[in-house]
Amino acid sequence: MTLGYMSQSTNSHTRPSLSTAHLSLYNEVIKAGLDIEILRDLLWLLNAHDELVAFPFICQNLIEILSVSTRQWDIPLSSFHLQYETIKLLEWVTTEEPRLTLIVGPKFGRKPKSPKTPEEKPDNPVVGRGATRHPTYSALCNSQASDLLKVKFRLLQGHLLFAQANELHSQKNRDEYENYGGQAPWKGLPNSPSVACLAVRELSEHRFAEVLLSLAVEQPPQLFAQSLVSLPTVDDSDFQEHLKGLRSFLQKAAGIRDWVSRQSSGGNGWGGSNHIHGHVEISKQLFQDEIAVGDLDDLDSNWGRIVQVTSISPISEVQLSLLSSDLSPDEFDTHDLLLSGDDEQTGLSGGISANTGAQMRHVLMANQLLPWNYQQLSISEVSEALSTCANWVNDHFPKNQPQQYDDADIKKLEAIC
């Protein structure tokens, strides 16, 4: 039996059922006499990258993670909804890596670069678009450089994998994963593990070694989740928030907290207006201005036009509910209303905002307010865009030179910021 496949673009996500990398690996598994269903379950559990970047390296990490976790917590492999044949498959992939890389593609055999010093940030070949779309897969690509902390970090990854495995298994959505071809990340869980996975990746860094050391990862999943009621305090405010995200995800999976249901803005007092994919709802409650960004007559600096929401008056109950929700920025569906604003009825202030500043940045970048997808830009393109922005700001807003600015320039500056 040979599975056929289509070519895929390097700039867009391909559904796993049509991915050249996935189908090539399927064929080799079948030829080797291994169980194709074991592989499909594994890729689904990991929300595996459509190009299987660094997959053999992740398989080796998984062997270590599952070994130390089942031994330390005295639980069977089936607790992860995996079988003994899964270990056999993982070992086969790592053993056959050189040959499989020639067949599946060069990205398959990628490995993180070894840090030159303990202080150097660990390399992760999945980070970028892959980490956004496949957070758990990316987090399993990290390792702890310190021999003293290596087992402790593997146990932390085990907690993440255990939580994802048990909740994902209850969703029974393997077919949905395999056939999802959207450009937004696949949402296979009630709430995204992305912030939790970011915290795990950061805990592989030397600068957070003391925090990792303080975590009771040796405890089995339920007890470890309970122990996170009290988190270590760190000076890095962003990392502190990521630790809270890790706690939230693990405690939801353990049943200590409830999963947060996403709320749709359609048909519940919002007038039933149409939704535009990738944008907030456009209704009578939103007021917007259209402005040009850059020079429309210059091909090199023409960024087209953007629509800027300038005011909103949402229903107070829904607004307060969204503001108090536990969702992180990438949790919101395209039909969720993210914005809040000055409203005499609710007493909320702050102009146009989301329930966090990060959400607004997420809306501005991910939802096509510019005529290209920022996630598909190369580093050089991002650098050029930043340089263009900086040059425009320096030209129009020179330092130490007070002057009057027109509204159009102010709006352009706000859009750039």
Image (spheres, helix red, strand yellow):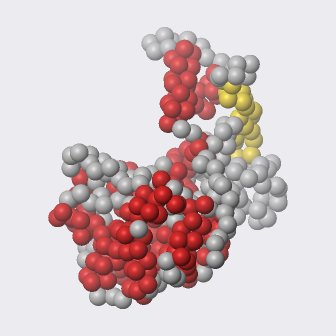
Q: Is residue 348 above or below residue 296?
A: below
In the image, taking residue 234 as reference, residue 101 lies left or right, namely right
In the image, taking residue 211 as reference, residue 386 lies left or right, namely right
- Nearer-the-camera pick, 4 or 304: 4
x, y percentage for residue 321?
A: 60, 63
Image quadrant assignment for residue 27:
bottom right
Image quadrant assignment for residue 217:
bottom left
Residue for point 47% across, 53% down: 106
Q: Is residue 2 above or below residue 199?
A: below
User: Farthest residue toward the left?
Assistant: 148
Q: Classify the position of the C terminus by image quarter.
A: top right
x, y percentage for residue 395?
A: 54, 14
x, y percentage for residue 248?
A: 43, 68
Is residue 72 at all visible to an observer of this figure? yes
Is residue 328 at all visible to an observer of this figure? no
- Nearer-the-camera pick, 232 or 146: 146
Q: Is residue 214 above or below residue 309?
A: below
Residue for point 70% across, 49% down: 279
